[in-house]
Image: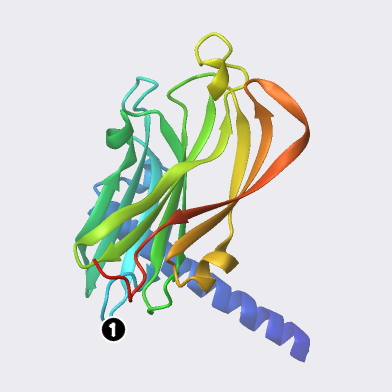
Amino acid sequence: MRPMRSVLGILTILALFSIAEASTAARAYKAMGIEVGDVLSGTALTSKVLPGGDKQVVCLVTYLTGKRDEASAVNVRLGVFRQSGQSLESAYSRDFGAENGGYVARGDLQLIDLDRDGANEIVVCYDSFREPLIDQRICEVVLRDDRGFRTAWSGPVEYDATRAARDVPRERRDRFRREFDWANTLRTHGVTLFMDKKVIAVAGERLEEPRLIEETFPLRRRPDDVP
């Protein structure tokens, strides 16, 4: 009976965790003015993204706006909230639909402490379908420094323009995928972002073998850098 009791205990803990997570998400949606019934997908994490001992709520939500046009029927928004009891106070927010003129969907959120200072950085990804024949998934790495939150890197992690022969110049009709290399990025304490890029097609022509490229992008200055 002991193994069964252990399994039941684990399931109970997981159920309670899911209930708590759902409650946090519902609070975040309400603070963002979004009805739970309109949510297509959402992630609400309680973690430290600001200096100090307190944890914040970070929420990314993909939801139905109630609008009928293709551009703005679905939106993706990010909210960072300070907690005060059951109340949530906005510390940072992004509206990716408003920033991109609509045509966004399928948001995804990750938190990772890149510089190992005890506060997580925010990684947001979402689909962009402004151009019907181009498949794009955009990601942003959002850091916080003395001036507040800022986007340190932004770009496509999935891109396929090989079908857009009439609308896109030949030199842009590529297809590639990028993957974050968090292990190497962490080794630099978040100073340099490492990514592995697999190029599948160039200028509309599929390569015989995918081309693998290691890419690096600056995220922040080293602590000993002189301004």
Residue at x-position 27% and y-position 34%: 98
Residue 226 image position (x, y, % from top left): 27, 70
Left/right of residue 154 with respect to residue 91 in the rendered view: right
**Is residue 23 visible in the rendered structure shown here?**
no
42 is higher (above) or lower (below) than 96: below
Say which of 45 and 96 sits in front.
Answer: 96
Q: Which residue is mark 1?
A: 53
6 is higher (above) or lower (below) than 108: below
Residue 89 image position (x, y, % from top left): 19, 63
Q: Residue furthest top?
A: 166
Q: Residue furthest right?
A: 208
Residue 163 is drawn in which quadrant? top right
Residue 203 image position (x, y, % from top left): 62, 22
Say which of 32 and 175 sits in front.
Answer: 175
Q: How many marks?
A: 1
Residue at x-position 54% and y-position 8%: 166
78 is higher (above) or lower (below) than 129: below
Q: Residue furthest front?
A: 226
Residue 201 is drawn in which quadrant? top right
Residue at x-position 33% and y-position 75%: 223
